[in-house]
Image (cartoon, grey):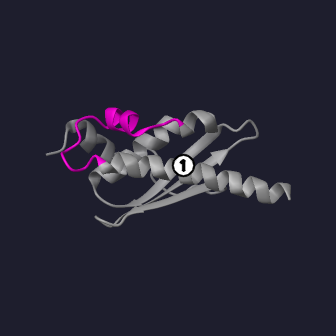
Amino acid sequence: MYSEKIIERFVNPKYAGGLRGANGTGKCDNEDCGDQVKLYISVNDDNVITDAKFKAYGGVCTIVALDVACSLIEGRSLDAALRTNYYQILEEMGQVPEGREYTANLAVEAIRAAIEDFYKKQEKVKK
C-alpha cells in the first residue's frame, strides 16, 4: 500500500511538532477527509525561512506531505518557498497511493497560508 520511502518518513518525521517563536502560521484543512494541518515558520531579517515545523491530524500521506513541505522550504527565501508546488512535493514523497495526491495540495496551501500570516504580522509591526 505505502512505499518504503513514505513509511520511513512517516515513522521518523523530522519536522513534526510546534515551533516556539514562529512568526508565521498556516492552517488548512480538507473538509472531504477531515485532515487538519498547521505549518509554522520562523523567518529571519533577510526573509529566509530558518525553521519550519508542522502539526497534523490526518493520515500517513498528510503527515509525509507536510514533512516534505518543511524540508523543501527550510533555508529558502519566502519568494522561493512560495514557488514550492504540488509536483515537487509529490516527487519528494515518492510513490503515493491513488487518491492520496490531495495531501500535496494541502501542504502547498499550508506553506502559502504561513507566509501570508508572516506578511500580515509584519504589516502590523510597521504600523
Q: Can residue 114 be seen in this view?
A: yes
* 89 part of magenta stretch: yes
- Going by the image, does 55 lie left or right of 93? right
Closer-to-camera residue (73/104): 104
* Residue 80 included in the magenta stretch of the image: no
Residue at the image point whose x is 40% and y is 59% from the top: 56
Residue 37, how many percent across, how many down?
43, 59
Task: Say how many tags the image has.
Answer: 1
| Residue holding disc 1 | 112
Pinpoint residue 78: horizontal percent, then vertical percent.
63, 39
For image coordinates 48% across by 43% down, the residue present is 70
Q: Is residue 27 left or right of residue 106?
A: right
Q: In which quarter of the image is residue 8?
A: top left
Magenta segment, which residues?
Answer: 83-101
Residue lying furthest right in this view? 127
SS at mark 1? helix
Kind of residue at disc 1: Arg
- Looking at the picture, does residue 59 appear above or below residue 49? below
Residue 23 appears left or right of 55: right
